[in-house]
Amino acid sequence: MEQYKKLTNEVGAPIADNENAITAGPRGPVVMQDVWLLEKMAHFNREVIPERRMHAKGWGAYGDFTVTGDISEFTKAKVLQPGHKTDVFVRFSTVAGERGAADCERDIRGFACKFYTEEGNWDLVGNNTPTFFIRDVHNFSDLNRAVKRDPRTGRRSAQNNWDFWTLLPETFHQRTIVMSDRGIPASFRHMHVFGEHTFSFYNSENKRVWCKFHLHTQQGIKCFTNEEAAKVNGMDREYHGKDLFESIEKGDYPRWTMYVQIMTEEQAKNHYENPFDITKIWPHKEFPLIEVGVLELNKNPENYFAEVEQAAFTPAHVVPGIGFSPDRFLQGRLFAYGDAQRYRLGVNHNHIPVNRARVEVNEYHRDGAMRTDGNYGGAPAYSPNSYGSWTAQPEVSEPPLEIEGAMWRYDPKDDPTDDNFRAGGNLWRILAEDKKQLLIENTAGDIASVTNNIKYRHAVHCYLADTEYGERITKAMGLDIEKVKELSKLDNNGLINATMSPEM
Ligand code: HEM
């Protein structure tokens, strides 16, 4: 038996028997004195931690990011300087499903990438679509309640989903993407991913530009139809996790090329719509893609819970040379992630190895649950102090940002430049006929159980984006095109009022 390692309890004492409880007599009850049994049961009872409120189901891998282009004129971030190579950890996810949900559902896919840079961690937390459903942080919890479980039935509800989406016309472009073939990627390896928001770069002269991140798959885009996905889900609910794991195990490393779009501060001031509205995109023709580098995933985690479940990403983690933007949705995210992680993993979650920076961390945070390092020993715990420790570095400050206007609750729909149907209409017009047909069929299938008033709202939005799109979706949903044309003459509030009753 020498080859077996010794079993111990949680403080290292050897365990005599791991299968037979201590009982009072051969057929008697278990005794309290079986402390090993108590430890085992108590630990088991506490093994489940809260799942992420959304993006609960996910898979991760390590890799590296190598800069192949030269964007040093825009950013001084060391991670983005020519030739630089940085270790990363990536987690992909679905959004609406819980931790046990099937991988191949129609949904957007999350992409979160932690760059362990020499200037601290940078997290790029995006999705596989270049835009998002909504643009005000107030709508975020509601979006998730609408797509998650109905409070009465405990089931997902197409009615809730489409009701919420169609009451907010800015969801139109994302609705179109989710209902298109891209709504069910064949694997994580076969999809593009995006930062979605407008972020900022600033260079060594402290000059700012606005930017968007795009990562294009080098494996090519592949998607599943509803039928293919239903079959895959029936056979293997962990299909995307398996695909990622196995391709890395056999050395077939997935790669993405990172590009950025750049908009100057001057261009942003004169842009024909709000460049900080996440429901809008910057057309490639106007803001061309500039190559930055290659992301490769080449190492699987050793332990799912330790590395994937406990991974914590936040858009608030940036490094000098990369900054935020006035995007009100991004601003909301800057609070949400750290807050969620302090609840989900605890205040010291950045000490967990997968989250820990690979550079020296010198902060004044102290104590807190599960503080497992030396807590900085006797080093001063206050600042300023007279011991010269850990002073702020003004040289990494971002350039100041000029702000215009009074503080107020502005509704972007009141902005005369706001067009919620331009991007979705443009997308429809560039789709090949087979993709158009799939979009129509997927939508008609997904919305089939929903009441007619909500279907009319969607049909009107499609019609406003493109008359052909509107006519074909109206037909597929079995609605009256004359009614759609009439309703499309109303403004947004008029349309909502006219489509409030399920009886129509
Ligand atoms: C105001 C809007 C948003 C809020 C308040 C929000 C909030 C959250 C929260 C609380 C989590 C769980 C974090 C955790 O427990 O670790 C999460 C996860 C995530 N969110 Fe958001 N989110 C927002 C918008 C977005 C957008 C626009 C994107 C994509 C661009 C996005 C991508 C993700 C991803 C990829 C994850 C999973 C990260 C992981 O793999 O651990 N979210 N979000």
Image: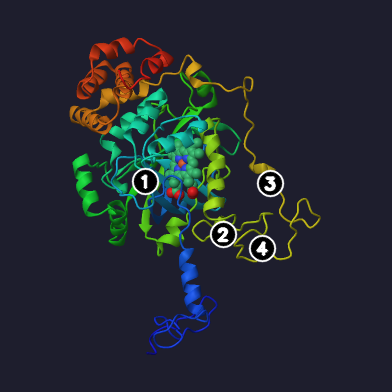
Distance (Cα) linking label 2 and label 1:
28 Å
Nearer to the camera, 27 or 271? 27
For label 4, the residue is 375
Instruction: Tell which of 456 and 219 is nearer to you.
Output: 456
- Check disc 1 and give the amino acid type: Gly
User: Along the line of sight, which residue is nearer the eye, 245 or 41?
Assistant: 41
Q: CA distance from mark 3 to mark 1?
A: 43 Å
Q: Is residue 412 above or below residue 95?
A: above
Task: Identify the residue position indicated by label 2 in the image.
Answer: 351
Q: Secondary structure at mark 3?
A: loop
Q: Report the residue marked by disc 3.
A: 393
Mark 1 lies on a secondary structure that is: loop
N-term mark: 4 or 1: 1
Q: Is residue 214 above or below residue 236?
A: above
Question: Can you give x and y, in whole percent of width and height, for residue 313 in the image?
Answer: 49, 49
Residue 99 appears in the rendering: yes
